[in-house]
Image (spheres, coloured by chain):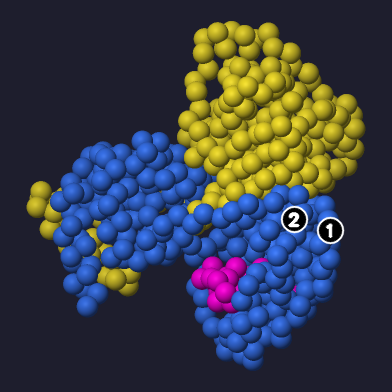
Amino acid sequence: MRIICPVKRVPDTAADKKMNADGTLDRDSAEAVLNANDEWAIEEALRIRERGADAELIVLCVGPEAAATTIRKALSYGLDGAIHVTDDAIKGSDAAGIARVIAAALRAEEFDLVIMGNQSSDARTMLVPAMLAELLDVPALTYAKALSVDGRTIRVDRETPTGHQTVEAQLPAVVSVVEAINQPRYPSFKGIMAAKSKPVTTKSLADIGLDAGEVGLDNAWTQVLDVTPRAPKTAGQRVHDDGSGTVGAKALADFLAARKLI
Amino acid sequence: MTDILVLVDHDHGSPKKISKQILTAARQQGDGQVHAVLFGAGADGSAERLGAYGVTKAFLWDSEDLTGYATEPMTDALIAALDQSGAQILLYPSDPFLSDAVARAAIRVRAGVVTDAIDLELVGDRMVATKAIFGGDMVSRCQVKGDRPQFIGVKANAFAAEESGGDPAELVPIQVEVAQGARRARVLGVVATESGGRPELTEAAIVVSGGRGLGDEQGFRLIEQLADALGAAVGASRAATDAGWYPHQHQIGQTGKTVSPQLYLGSGISGAIQHRAGMQTSQAIAVINKDAEAPIFSIADIGIVGDLYKVIPPLIEEINRRKQ
């Protein structure tokens, strides 16, 4: 079985971010990290293998040359190799554009299962897994909080606002995972050293057979008109409780009443 | 004239709060007709309630395929409803399950999608959506390009729901033949978690949340009591969900849910940037924390420096007293 884990290089949430004039993020302005939710996807891929599946685990990353560090980080958990799709024409793609790149890269690959985080910490659209599945014409089992694979059958508990839904499908399939699915391990020293020599195949749009007219800022189906910093919030009223609790409680109740919340 | 189709989430024909908010926005922003699309049981009883929000036509579909298979039958029906309504703009609640069908439909009909709108403005035939990005650090205005269909996801609590009055909506069955290939992710069962009658986290007008400062799992019983006094949903920081004190689906923050309620009331939460990314666009923020240096105070409209175990019990009493 071949499992592909698409991962994203995202700006650190804590970093100050600068925007380009075209409304895209200046991705050199902020320190970049591996998207946190993708770590659960990697962990789940590792666990499928550790439960006895004969599986090859491959990282797929769409991103600039600098994403090589993100790929090494992903490999350090113990995956077998990576595909790095990089091409200047991809810059500025929207969710659908990135889904088209990932889909094109996967069409050139053998794969049985795609496991990815349910959201990226920068864009947070949550659209890409379902869009990818649509482009690949496979089922999408999204928001998985539990997952099992038995032969060619995959079963997933999908987190809902009110509980969960158990869904079953035949491979190949796309799965997105939520935080509840596992507690990811830390890369071992051995894993970090081994990641340096794992095979990484770099591919351009031409290599994956995708026309540059399908991707990038100019060809995106959506556009950003403008971006403005939100007015920084200033701290409001501060009340020191006297240890009894009643001072704090009264201040809060007054606050709620003034806003007609009680 | 620009007609708008609204994907209405409902409970046996009764539109959910977020859908009433979106219908109101569609009516106020649009210059054409507002239509609705509803899936599932009981939708045929919604005509008057939808009419009260200004809906002209409601496109309905219920089928065993909807409950029997994930996402794809709904995608087929959604595309059929778009066709039948003739609308070029689809507004939908930013709910993960509905978003999946919207995402698949967008690829199929080559529509552009903008998620998580907190404001809308129709400019010509183009719906311009305002959204908070990068955890609320910045605000952007986005739109769909070209003459393709426009799919816009709208966040809860972005608009106030207001009835306009109006005749019952005309109910129109959606003509859809579900493709055999759409029946490939089979639903085996659905499990409802005990919600304690509380509203859904991302929809609630008030969110009461707890973090590491609670000290243990039992602390969340107190948070739940406070939530119930306010009719609020319960949220948690990642420290609390990772510790196993509260279920992960309640986690607010960068890796979990984003909430923007009228009031966020956080107790025992220091306010790491990863948590703030999930709540700092809340309309009002109140916090209780022992540590006067906690970063959450810097974004709080009211900050109580004190012991949450001392402050919350009399707060619950005070709320209950004032409610009478």
- Counting residues from the N terminus, which is met first, the one under dot 1 or under dot 2? 2
Q: Give the percent coordinates (x, y) of residue A254.
A: 22, 66
Residue highlighted by disc 1: B179
Which corner quadrant of the image does residue B274 belong to? top left
Question: Element type at marker 1?
Answer: loop
For residue B82, say whether it is visible.
Answer: no
- x%, y% of residue A96? 75, 46
Please state which amino acid type lies under the numbered disc 1: Ala
Check the picture and name the quadrant holding the N terminus of chain B. bottom right
Residue B198 picture quarter: bottom left
- Chain A: its colour in the image is yellow
Boundaries of the magenta span: B2-23
Q: Which chain is blue?
A: B
Query: On screen, B209 above or below B214?
Result: below
Q: Position of residue A227 (x, y in %)?
A: 61, 50
- What residue sits right under mark 2 in the picture? B72
> In the rendered view, does B233 fall on the left or right side of B321?
right
